[in-house]
Amino acid sequence: MDALDVHLNGSYLDATFGRGGHAALILKRLGPDGLLIALDCDPDAIVFAETRFSGDSRLKPVHCNFSEIGACVRQYAPGGQVNDILLDLGVSSPQLDNAERGFSFRQDGPLDMRMDPSVGEPASGWLARVESDELVRVLKQYGEERYARRIALAVVEARSEQPILKTRQLAEIVQRAMPAGAVRPDRIHPATRTFQAIRIAVNAELEMLHAALEAAIGVLAPGGRLVVISFHSLEDRIVKQAIRAASKPPPANRRMPSAPGFIATLRPVGSLIRPTDEEAGRNPRARSARMRVAERIGTSPSGGQP
Ligand SMILES: C[S@@+](CC[C@H](N)C(=O)[O-])C[C@H]1O[C@@H](n2cnc3c(N)ncnc32)[C@H](O)[C@@H]1O
């Protein structure tokens, strides 16, 4: 909230509404003429927003992917720009806790994992057709899974016998594929990295994040803040690089000793923020959170000077 710097009658975008924890706090600081666009690609989140904040005309719930931030802000915000944008990435607790959404192997459910079940293909469909080499790449890159090849082989073998349709079924295949010493009760469940990797692939999470960051810079008002909370190093690297690319010219090389015409559009605010041990103890799901903040500088999206 401090990083967002909410003013009474400004326009704000919560691009990952979830269940409105952040949105409720933003609304508390917002005056009667302020605007908060609450975006989420999960239809359940939007139904929740419409119900919980039904009497509050300052809140505009929008069902869309945050890669469409540009079009969304141009449609709903006065002047086509907002003062601050918040991205709190990943899955929400209700998505994780609802077995029907297929994000977790703690309870059995259909292997879906789509943030927006109205588009795309469920994880079970993706897993039924993905080539073995592509599965290895996904598990290595998105899950940083050292046993990627063993797991991919086990998946290919299992799916030749029967389709992999349930979360527990996949978790057991992964567990069986692990070498004996790698499964220890004091470590994270052996399927954790595989589930993360498949979820990232099914939702094209990294591509969507790239698109969102680029679009966000385009619709932030000068002086506006971009606040991004990510939950693993792949996302954080993308955020860090996007802020760097918008704030500093690319490093000089022999072919291009200086970047011609580079104009900075962001200024980093502070450095990486991690939860304290006390916060991670109180809220274990915040354990891996990393927050970065940047401020929009330069001309406004409409071309005027700040
Ligand atoms: C960690 S939760 C946000 C929790 C929220 N800040 C709160 O206080 O309740 C992330 C949310 O982002 C949504 N989300 C993830 N990827 C998205 C995308 N590409 N476009 C739009 N929403 C997305 C998820 O559906 C989920 O509801």
Image (cartoon, rainbow, N blue to C red):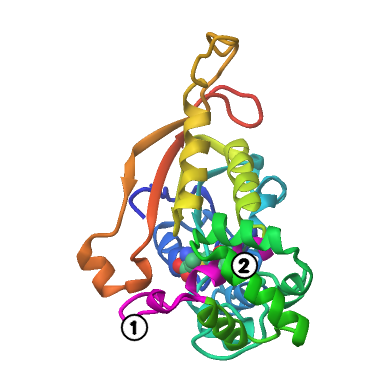
Report the residue that reaches farthest toward the front: 180
Could you say which disc has been placed on residue 198 in the image?
2
Please state which of residues 239 and 25 is positioned toward the viewer in this rendering.
Answer: 239
Q: Give the residue pinned by disc 1.
A: 185
Can you give x and y, in whole percent of width and height, for residue 125 in the image? Answer: 77, 75
Badge 1: residue crowd in 10 Å (few <14, some 14–19, many ≥20): few
Location of residue 184 (image quadrant): bottom left
Magenta residue span: 178-203
- Mark 2: which secondary structure? helix
Q: Nearer the viewer, mark 2 or mark 1?
A: 1
> What's the residue type where badge 1 is placed?
Pro
- Mark 1: which secondary structure? loop
> What's the residue type where badge 2 is placed?
Ile
Marks 2/1: CA distance?
23 Å
Residue at image coords 60%, 73%: 45
Check residue 15 for magenta coloring.
no
Can you give x and y, in whole percent of width and height, for residue 185 in the image? Answer: 34, 83
Q: Would residue 276 appear left or right of 185 to someone viewing this image?
A: left
Q: Is residue 74 above or below residue 46?
A: above
